[in-house]
Image (cartoon, helix red, strand yellow):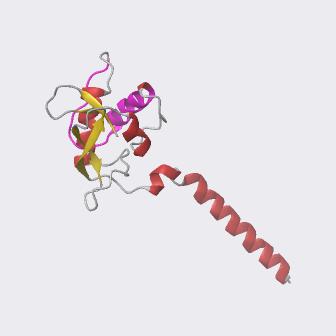
Amino acid sequence: MVSAFARRLASVVVAGTVLAGAMLTSAGPAAAAYPTCYGKRKVATAPYNELVWIPAVSSTGSTSCNLRLGNYNNTGVSVLQDAINRCNRPQNFAPIVVDGDFGQKTKDLLIVAQAIRETTTDGIYGPLTRDALFWPLPSGEGCRAVL
């Protein structure tokens, strides 16, 4: 017969194993903390306070959001793709198609842009990447950082 202590110990070990597995397979803290950007919002830039479009949460307008591989048919992804092409892509890299689908090519070029802007190179767009990237002016006459 199994003692109460042995049953309790077994349940603790199983619970710990399940928790450890969940921690290993979950998204990183930045991705888990922010909702997906499905829209866009105009924000001020430095140093001249000009307005640029950046990805945002459609329902709240918050720009603290993320984009990642697998997001599709998404205005926020289109804004990011345009910014990568126009302001954050080395000349020797082909531009990506601005289609609103965050596929492997978008991820790969985002990693390049993140490296250029000296931020985390994880291929996930979030607040740190937002603040590191440059954003195209609507006039088409340059790129700016957000405030």
In the image, farthest residue toward the top: 92
41 is higher (above) or lower (below) than 130: below
What residue is rendered at 38% in x and 57% in y? 35
109 is higher (above) or lower (below) than 123: above
Residue 99 appears in the picture as rendered: yes
Task: Using residue 40 as the reference point, say whether residue 119 is left or right of it.
Answer: right
Q: Nearer the viewer, residue 135 or 21?
A: 135
Q: Give x and y (percent) for residue 128.
A: 44, 41
In the image, farthest residue toward the left: 139
Task: Using residue 140 as the reference point, say whether residue 67 is left or right of it.
Answer: right
Q: The N terminus lies in which quarter of the figure?
A: bottom right
Q: Give x and y (percent) for residue 56.
A: 29, 51
Q: Nearer the viewer, residue 90 or 127?
A: 127
Q: Give x and y (percent) for residue 90.
A: 33, 20
Q: Is residue 34 magenta?
A: no
Q: Nearer the viewer, residue 88 or 8?
A: 88
What residue is rendered at 38% in x and 49% in y? 66
125 is higher (above) or lower (below) than 116: below
In the image, farthest residue toward the front: 48
What residue is rendered at 34% in x and 40% in y? 147
The quadrant in which residue 134 appears is: top left
The magenta span reads 93-115
Q: Give x and y (percent) for residue 21.
A: 62, 57
Q: Nearer the viewer, residue 146 or 113?
A: 146
Q: Is residue 112 magenta?
A: yes
Residue 74 appears in the picture as rendered: no
What residue is rendered at 38% in x and 29% in y? 113
The quadrant in which residue 111 appears is: top left
